[in-house]
Image (spheres, grey):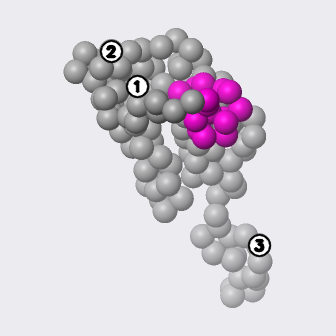
Amino acid sequence: MMTLRSVPAILWTVLIVLICVIPASWFLSGGEGDGPSLLDRLLLGLPPDKVIHFVLFAGFGVLWRLAGAPGLATLLGGVALAVLTELIQTIPALDRSADLPDLLTDLAALAVSLVLFPRGLAPVPRSAEAAGGLASRDE
């Protein structure tokens, strides 16, 4: 069932798919200047591609856990999404390629998100009575 809490997770999932199917030629190419770019310096030498994959899939795990999705469902959905996005990138028209290190980065990010949010959020009570905050009027 879709709830308001699941909207950010759904939008994030759509964002992952969109980013992974954008043709390679749409991304900014490297600059012609001397030395490392600002992005390279901000990432402390980490490969930008791997950082992006990690952020996208850690965000996926966190947002789905915050939406109340069970951990196993989040893990299985994330693994399926990671595999699917890598397979989609083999489509020649996208000028992309599947990459095992990208897939492993996605899976590591999912694992980290599940460790950080092992229980997600408790369900929001429908009323104060359900939470035990108010006595029943029938008493």
Residue that badge 1 annotates: 85
Image position, residue 137 (x, y; %): 69, 87
Q: Nearer the viewer, mark 2 or mark 3?
A: 2
| Image vertical order of residue 118 relative to residue 32, above or below | below
Residue that badge 2 annotates: 90
Q: Nearer the viewer, residue 90 or 7?
A: 90
- Tell me the kind of residue under disc 2: Thr
Task: State whether residue 20 appears in this view.
Answer: yes
Question: Element at badge 3?
Answer: loop
Residue 96 belongs to the span the image colors magenta: no
Q: First in sequence, mark 1 or 2: give its number.
A: 1
Other residues around mark 2 within 10 Å, as few (<14) / some (14–19) / many (≥20):
some
Which image quadrant for residue 85?
top left
Question: Element at badge 2?
Answer: loop
Q: Nearer the viewer, residue 70 or 112?
A: 112
CB under 8 Å between callouts 3 and 1? no
Q: Residue at x 51, y 33 (%)?
A: 33
In the drawing, does residue 115 fall left or right of residue 32? Answer: right
Q: Point out which mark residue 132 bears.
A: 3
Image position, residue 43 (x, y; %): 66, 35
The Cα atoms of the two marked residues, 3 and 1, are separated by: 45 Å
Which image quadrant for residue 95?
top left
Q: Residue at x 69, y 76 (%)?
A: 129
Q: Point out which mark residue 123 bears.
A: none
Residue range in magenta is 35-51
Q: Nearer the viewer, residue 44 or 94?
A: 44
Q: Nearer the viewer, mark 1 or mark 2?
A: 2
Other residues around mark 3 within 10 Å, as few (<14) / some (14–19) / many (≥20):
few
